[in-house]
Image: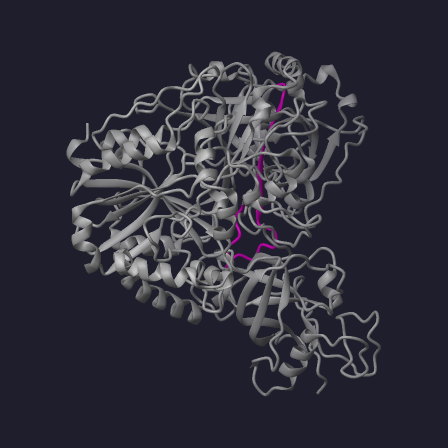
Amino acid sequence: MSGELGQPQAGPSHAGLEFPNPERSRSGVPGGVIRRVGAQGRRSWIQKVLEQITDSPLQWVTPSEVVPVAVLAVQRYLLEDEPRDTIPKPPLYCYDVTISDGVYQEKCYLDPSLNFLVYKNILKVGIEMKICRVSCLYNEKRLGQGILCIDNVHCGDTLEAISLETPFRNSAHKEIPERPLRGGKSHYLALWNNEDPYGDIWLTNKQPEEHNFNNTKIISLSHLEMTWANRRNFPALLVRILHKSKLRYYGKPDKKMIEPYQTFLEVADSSGTVSVIMWNALCPEWYKSLRVGLVLLLQDYSVKKSYPFRMQPLPVDPQIKLISTMEICLNLRDPPTNIIIIPEKQVKPEWRLPKLNHRFITRSELDDVPENYICDVIGILIFVGRVQRSKKKENREDFWSYRWIHIADGTSEQPFIVELFSTSQPEIFENIYPSTQSMTYFVCTQLKVVRNDHQVPKLLYLTTTNESRVFITGHRGQPYTNDTKVKNFIHWIKTRTDSEEVKNTVIGGYYPYPPVPETFTKYSSSVKVESLLTAISEVRKEIEDLQYREQKRIAIQGIITVIKYIPHASATENASASETPRGANQPSTSQAARRENQSQERDNNNKRHQDDDPMSSQGFQTAYTSLSPTKKKRIVQGPNAKQVPVPQPETSAQTKGCKPDMPNIFLNRESASASAAGKGRRPISDRWESQLWKEKKFALIDHLHYSHVYPESIPRKFIFEQRKFLTEQFNSQPAKYIPPEGRPPNLDDFKSARSLGHFEVTILGLNHEIAIDVAFLPMYSPEDLRTSQIDSLLSCMNYSCVYPQATPGNDSMASPRALASDIIKAASKLDKAHIVGILDICNLGNDKVEVYLHRIYSPTNDS
């Protein structure tokens, strides 16, 4: 038997390995056939593995030589149920991983048992990876066809650069459009959500074309509403698009739909407005070419009774009738719909098609706008948060992607706070950054007002709806440019070419929004979860279940026993401590390896409480200072560094392995006192420890360490010249490798948006058996529109601390030391007091997890 596997052909997506003909030449052979003998130059590791597996009597092999390969792509798709499956399973997403050994590229199937490596963003593009075991999955409907499967891997560090010039060994893997290796699906999905169009099946080439209406019979929507039930054939519709929804993916393993997509268009003529549903393969063909305001001629559509529970968006003109009894269906077949975009110059006044009426509001008007009001906004971006994800349903693999942004429009000192979910516009969502030029402005339509005036602080922000659209370039020619408020904003921005808003822009970081109410009673009524409180023994599982960029808020009961202040320090210290090299035992291999690491971690955690012993700290200090820099780094960032800080002495933030540059507030002035303190002497950590902790810390059965703040959670001053790098840092991990432009900078080299340092808070469970260390990031800024967490923490401690409001002419501000002193003093009143802590859990990927203390409540004083 020859030593090469080849390309399966069953179904549109099967492109794998192929048995070669030894007599055929290597060049230009479909399937990428390689000869065993006579290959020139460096030998391909991928080729040697393929030869080894085809010569093996087993279906799997352990490569005789394990050579690092580079990961070039991680692509997701839905795998259909196998014929032997009788019970439908929940959606099962599979991953194809493209690797390069420096000679060839190969697309491989990732065994589902390793999916967790993608969920946690451990297996990602740009890293070095060692494949320890491979197998071949054959297509039993074809002769000599199968795909290479990755069964066991070790994920290494990120590579500085990877060449994309290496060819595919199998030429079928580079065909366009790309097809998944397994199943009958014809396309890949976006890596982190289902709303974004991804891949080359999504066309953008539909252009307006003039139409001869002489032989075209047109029916009005109101007439169609009255007669559709008695018709078999429907005349053409001439309508304008008023709203366009984001995509909905409804694929399931037991459904044989090749492109199961759906989108809604709200269209109107002079007689009414109605919902149009575009189905399946029409979405990749038309979705990206259709925009709000276009005039369409629709032919060969179908009509059905409307879905009773769907809420249609408000009509742009209250005088136009809202038709809710029927829906227009557009399909590639049954019947095949004909869609024509009519050029605006051909639109006649006598058609009386409705104009687009926008609902722009200014920030000064927002305070008086009622809850659930739908509005449009325009402004400049002054803050763009990192991309986050939230589960659509528990125990499912589907997520929403969203980020928080601030928009200023010059009518108020306060910006719009917007919760921006993905709107199926990844080319915008993944490329927005703060405005640094006066003529760069941001438009978002169909936003819903969220407010609660009965909680303290008052809740007020905007969130996207199903019909929201985002515009950041190409404003010329858009219908909204004629709106009076848009014109006023453009006039304002032209007169403020060097505005403070543009100077003090911020990107990324942990963003604790929305704030929780001031009492636990109000908090209890505002959350929608199965269990209001999480037992401290269940926190570890909550953390382990979190996926990449997922952020979750939980409430636990406990007792605050330790508060330690970690002052702001230099970026140099932070850079040396924030790197996370991956050791051989870190959770990055297989499930078996992960379980072994978790077991070892628990054993280590059970001993971690001994680190607070002064003798242990002193002993570690001696050992630490005698080590080489490499070994120091290994100790600080070992396999358990994601949860467990190294045992440290109490005197120095530097020797404690603290990562000092941990800002999470936005200010436009530098703290001279903090800078002087950082340069003049080594920062000292202020600490309070309760008597209860001294008694119980040696008897704990588990101590969770999640108080470390990573560089990704620090908001950074935005620098336009580095926009590409900064945007990539706070976006989701891409599905395909993007070569860096030159040597990329270090994130720690960018100025933080201002920090007062942070606190490490230890919460002991009510049963005194388990404790958890969490981070508390105090925020203080007259420009910062988020909740004053300093005041909320101190008020819960029954301690009053009021800081002077900084003004442009007043640089007086509470120093970090004064802040620490006040909170430490307040904490002393908490000895043995039971509290409810609201925690934000954040998974940053690559085994980096943070837990933040968002607020504390005193259940005995809940008023």
Q: Which residues are magenta?
A: 249-270
Magenta run includes residue 81: no
Q: Quadrant of the C terminus?
A: top left
Type of colouring: one colour
Identify the image quadrant of the N terminus: bottom right
Residue at 71% across / 44% down in the picture? 203
**How many numbered marks, from 0 up?**
0
Q: Nearer the viewer, residue 81 or 718?
A: 718
Residue 682 sits above or below residue 819 on the image: below
**In which image quadrant can residue 373 be found?**
top left
Q: Nearer the viewer, residue 747 or 678?
A: 678
Which residue: 81% across, 71% down?
29
Where does residue 550 sit, x and y in percent of width and height?
44, 47
Residue 262 lies within the magenta run: yes
Q: Is residue 88 above or below residue 707?
A: below
The spot of residue 264 in percent (x, y) is: 57, 36
- Say if 71 sits above or below 346 in the image: below
Residue 198 position in % (x across, y down)? 63, 48
Place residue 635 in its image quadrant.
bottom left
Can residue 328 be seen here? The reply is yes
Q: Is 320 displayed left or right of 800 in the figure?
A: right
Residue 288: image x %, image y %? 67, 39
Residue at 31% from the left image edge and 24% from the top image edge: 456
Q: Is residue 40 left or right of residue 155?
A: right
User: In the rendered image, is residue 300 in sight?
Assistant: no
